[in-house]
Image (tube, rainbow, N blue to C red):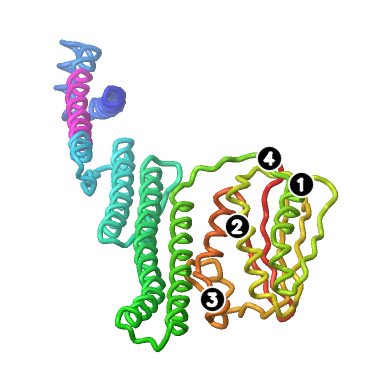
Amino acid sequence: MLGLFSSLGITALSLVTIYALSTLLVRIPVINYPFRLVINNIGSLPVLIVLGILIFLVSYFMVNKRFVRDLQEIDSGLQEVSSGRFEYQIPIHTNDELGQVAKSINLMTEQLNDYLKEITHGLREIAQGNFEAKIPVRPGSQLGEVASSINQMSRQLNQSIQEERNAEKTKNDLITGVSHDLRTPLTSILGFLEVIEEDRYQDEVELRYYVNIAYEKAKGLKKLIDDLFEYTRINNGLPLNMNELDMVSFIGQLMEEFVPTFEKEGMECRLEAAEERITIMADGDRLVRAYENLMTNAIRYGKKGGVVDIAVRREINHAVISFTNYGEPIPERDLPFIFDRFYRVESSRSKQTGGTGLGLAITKSIIEVQGGQIAVKSSSQKTTFETRFIIR
């Protein structure tokens, strides 16, 4: 259509020009005879028609030849782009509509090629293990969605690898900790049994003394194995029997069970509890083990203060249970690791107070597996372990 109108325009302009020139030439006596002869014999209108047809055909052919050439180059360029050669540029000969189309296609392929290079570079970085590499996301395009998906995949892959590494480190740390804590009492037991086996004791009193030490070491070893078994059981998805539990009466019963222990240690236990029911959903059998650990911990390390304070209160939609003792504080450097398994504060690594290093780790696992939270605060005056559960 563009070629047709262009040819018609050229033809009309040419005929007007020819008519003006012929009118001018007729007035010149020397050269007007041939024009008069043609006009008199054929007529001016048929001559103009014939000339118009010839000019139209020639101009149509010339215009469409350039037009077809540009279309062929654009088609060839699109075929190159469709085959994946985004770096290909269509030659631009004119600034007309076809030239603008070719420029737009070249700009599109150039931007597409640059973005694909960025995506390719990002994928190479990820393939080499650099999961921190991020591909720029251009919103509003499908390639932008591809880049966003790749970045998300990279993050998840990096997270999975980190979790796997942490799990491997956790396993190795667990083996190391278990080996160390099992070897120490086992070495003592074997040492005393060797003395007994070789009759290297003076009398029956010394024999009973050695047997008693070996027995106490064996009990400590059994407790460590039991704690280790319970810790692994909890963290491997122990089934829970969840029921409504009134924490005020629950903690009250727990205190009654520890009355003989407080009397033996010459300590006092004080309870501050709300008069209303504070009910949560929990497995009572598992939860009692967690609070037994916190109570034992408060007694063990709070002898100096002589008092253990327990509080059961409601904070908005949470049940908050805290255990406070007034003994030696936990050093600030140890607070972030106090719930790690086999972690024991240096000052408590003694025969009298040193536990298995799994008590607080078991407590944390029991609390968290039931949807609760646990935290610790310690100052020169007091140490408080606080647990939180959503009230049902």
Are the residues flagged by discs 2 and 3 in contact, CB closer than 8 Å? no
- Answer whether residue 52 is magenta in the image: yes
Give the labeled residue for mark 3. Answer: 354
Compare residues 7 and 178 and report the one nearer the observer: 178
Q: Secondary structure at mark 2?
A: helix
Q: Nearer the viewer, mark 4 or mark 3?
A: 3
- Residue at 67%, 65% in the rendered image: 385
Q: Earlier in the sequence, mark 2 or mark 1?
A: 1
Q: Which residues are magenta?
A: 51-74
Q: Position of residue 231 (x, y in %)?
A: 47, 57
Quadrant including the C terminus: top right
Q: Residue sitting at 31 percent across and 23 percent down?
A: 5
Query: What residue sits right under mark 4 in the picture?
Result: 244
Q: Do the numbered discs 4 and 3 sit on residues whose CB atoms are within 8 Å?
A: no
* Amino acid marked by disc 1: Ile
Answer above or below: position of 263 versus 380.
above
- Gap between marks 1 and 3 measured at Cα: 34 Å
Looking at the rendered structure, the number of numbered marks drawn on it comes to 4
Q: Which mark is residue 290?
A: 2
Q: Amino acid at mark 3?
A: Gly
> Residue 369 at what x, y percent from top left?
54, 50
- As drawn, the label of residue 106 is none
Q: Label 2 sits on what residue type?
A: Ala
Where residue 49 sits, quadrant-wise, is top left
Asked whether the beta carbons under mark 2 and mark 1 sit within 8 Å of each other, the answer is no
Give the mark, 2 or 3, whose residue is nearer the N terminus.
2
Residue furthest to the front: 203
Q: Are marks 1 and 4 in contact (CB under 8 Å)?
A: no
Q: CA distance from mark 4 to mark 3?
A: 35 Å
